Amino acid sequence: MTKVGFIGLGIMGGPMAANLVKAGFEVTGYNRSRAGVDRLVAAGGRGANSVGQAVRDADAVITMLPDSPDVRAVVLGEDGVLAHAREGALLIDCSTIRPDVSREVGQAAAAKGIQALDAPVSGGEQGAIEGNLSIMVGGAAEAFETAREMFDVVGATIVHVGGPGAGQTVKAANQLIVAGTIELVAESLVFLEAHGVDTGAAIEVLAGGLAGNRILDRKAPAMVRREFTPGFRVELHHKDLGIVLQAAREAGVVIPLGAAVAQLMAALEAQGHGALDHGALLKLVEQLSGRGQE
Ligand code: NAD
């Protein structure tokens, strides 16, 4: 597989597509706004003016779009991927969407002779730039093997977790853990500041003990500086916690802490902070503690 059509060149898709170019793939990209396409062209890729133009000659089509309705529109739509991709092509959806929508997309693709994988990722913008994302893949084992050479370029931990939709279910669990951890890190930072402790020193020692985690390593310093440039937007995490709550309900499982964090993320979104990084959960902890700056 050498020719890749890439749809969705945003915070994540942009650097992923650029890394594929660097690794020698012939990448043709399309994005709704032109800036993403221009960045890909500057990185050595080709620009397309439509989904059809991006995918017509592709061996593999990768989508990295915000939400379930976007993937439905881009893949299943009248002028979408399935209308233009050639039979035998491979569709890899890296967006985080509802598991049932992934299965629907997989079935529609199969009907056109196109194999599909759901392959959501974790690792954030930094992981996308460095090419060391974690990729949780659902779909047929054979399609996974075919996609492996592309996954190896954009990811470091790549695991086939099951059949269609399974990648999305694992990603939902990922988002539950990340949101809960950010909330606890935010609470810890506000708590430490209230006691006048040097948060830099605290982060350093906490990171080496049992409390150590990637949020502490990667996000806490920016949270201390009140820098909430995304990264991962609150509105996207709000979407993901909706997926988690629905999937938990379907399975008859209760996630009390997850439900509480989902409400906090919803509050942040309702307050107009949807475009901030999810580390902005710290703002809410401050507000609830009467220590907010606004
Ligand atoms: P983003 O908004 O930066 O990028 C999405 C891109 O898709 C945008 O450039 C937008 O113009 C484009 N787009 C939207 N609709 C389109 C359409 N119909 N046709 C063509 N292009 C279209 O979002 P992102 O942060 O890159 O996230 C993408 C997906 O990856 C989401 O599902 C998100 O939940 C997931 N994700 C994000 C991160 C992160 O840290 N940002 C980490 C892991 C997973």
Image (tube, rainbow, N blue to C red):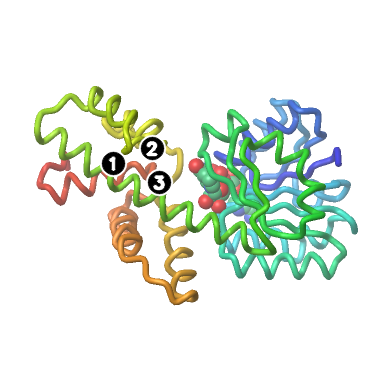
Residue pictured at 65% horizontal, 31% vertical: 39
Q: Which SS class for mark 1? A: helix
Residue under label 2: 213
In the foreground, 236 or 151:
151
Residue pictured at 15% horizontal, 39% vertical: 191
Where 258 falls versus 252 (above or below)?
above
Q: Position of residue 194 (x, y in %)?
A: 10, 36
Amino acid at dot 1: Val
Residue under label 1: 185
Asked whether the beta carbons under mark 1 and mark 2 sit within 8 Å of each other, the answer is yes
Residue 271 visible to an observer of this rendering: yes
Which badge, 2 or 3, is on the more N-terminal residue? 2
Give the number of the mark in front: 1 or 2.
Answer: 2
Alpha carbon distance from label 1 to label 2: 10 Å
Q: Position of residue 149 (x, y in %)?
A: 78, 38
Alpha carbon distance from label 1 to label 3: 20 Å
Residue under label 3: 275
